[in-house]
Amino acid sequence: MSSQPAGNGFGSGLVIRAPAKLNLSLAVLARRTDGFHEIESLMVPVTLHDTLRVRRRDDDAITLAVRYAGRLAGADGRGLARDVPVDDSNLVVRAARALREQAGATAGLDIELVKEIPSGAGLGGGSSDAAAVLLAAAGSDDAAVRSRAAYALGVVGGTGATARLAALLGDAADNVRYNSAVGLARQRDPAAWDVLEEMLTLPDVEAPAGDDVKQSERYKRAIVALNGLKAVGLLVDSTRTPPPASVAARVTALRKDPVPDVRTAATALAAKLERISGSPSSSPLEQ
């Protein structure tokens, strides 16, 4: 999945290619600690793709226009060019609307979907189109939208998603970096290690009783630490290798964290790292 600035009068929007997916085999494996399952899939490259053109609107409307190109636009392909809905039943609209609501954003979108993948052909056109919306959102100028898109791309996966997540590791917004790192951990990508270490390094926040602002900051820091610990566990589970020594040291240090939930999660993860490495959990692991 690739993106580029849109031309042909499309303003400052994006053009995203959403490739067809030909799956030769699929095996659902063990359930992971995040509730999802590992899979083994054998896929072959497919050059056939849909194209989405996405542009921001000044109001809050989300519009979708569909047209056909390639063989679907020709006489021999009209039988494959089935009607594609343009309302909320379309995965593209649903993905855009759900992402906007989760991010608390209000801006609208004009989306043009150029179909070359036949609908209902088992080539994954609908899901690929929806994923392309997430890829576009990851380039938003709204940090909340980028953050939600990063989280969703980490679940969806794919080459385009992981490449975009890797780029977002350098984002100026903390939540974007953190969700990108967790997403890469879900996809077994060791590029996440540096930001995961950052998540585990955040200090506890002193929060006096009655200070709602500090209480909120302390809660957020604890959530970041817990997500970082969970992501380290995902990478360790998928690679069966210990983390970098600096990350292992942070896990060990968090066993004495002031927040009980963080202490509990860190203690459990340290025990797992000890089993994998054979090193005492009280000392940093060597990579």
Image (cartoon, rainbow, N blue to C red):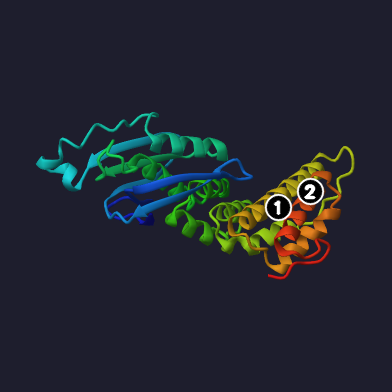
Q: Which mark is residue 262?
A: 2
Q: Quadrant of residue 214?
A: top right
Q: Nearer the viewer, residue 166 or 252?
A: 252
The correct choice, above or below, for 90 with respect to 196 in the image is above
- Amino acid type at circle 2 is Val
Residue 23's spot in the image, x, y percent?
A: 35, 48
| Distance from Cα at disc 1 to Cα at disc 2 | 8 Å
At 59% from the left edge and 53% from the top edge, which residue is drawn?
Answer: 176
Between 141 and 259, the one lying in front of the other is 259
**Horizontal placement of 106 versus 124: left or right?**
right
Can residue 106 be seen from the camera position used here? no
On the image, the x and y values in percent for residue 31 come to 58, 43
Mark sitting on residue 206: none
Percent x, y of residue 206: 86, 49
- In the picture, measured across the screen, residue 32 lies left or right of residue 8, that is right
The residue drawn where x is 15% and y is 37% is 78
Q: Position of residue 196 (x, y in %)?
A: 66, 58
Q: Is residue 42 left or right of residue 263?
A: left
Quick one: which residue is furthest to the right in this view?
209
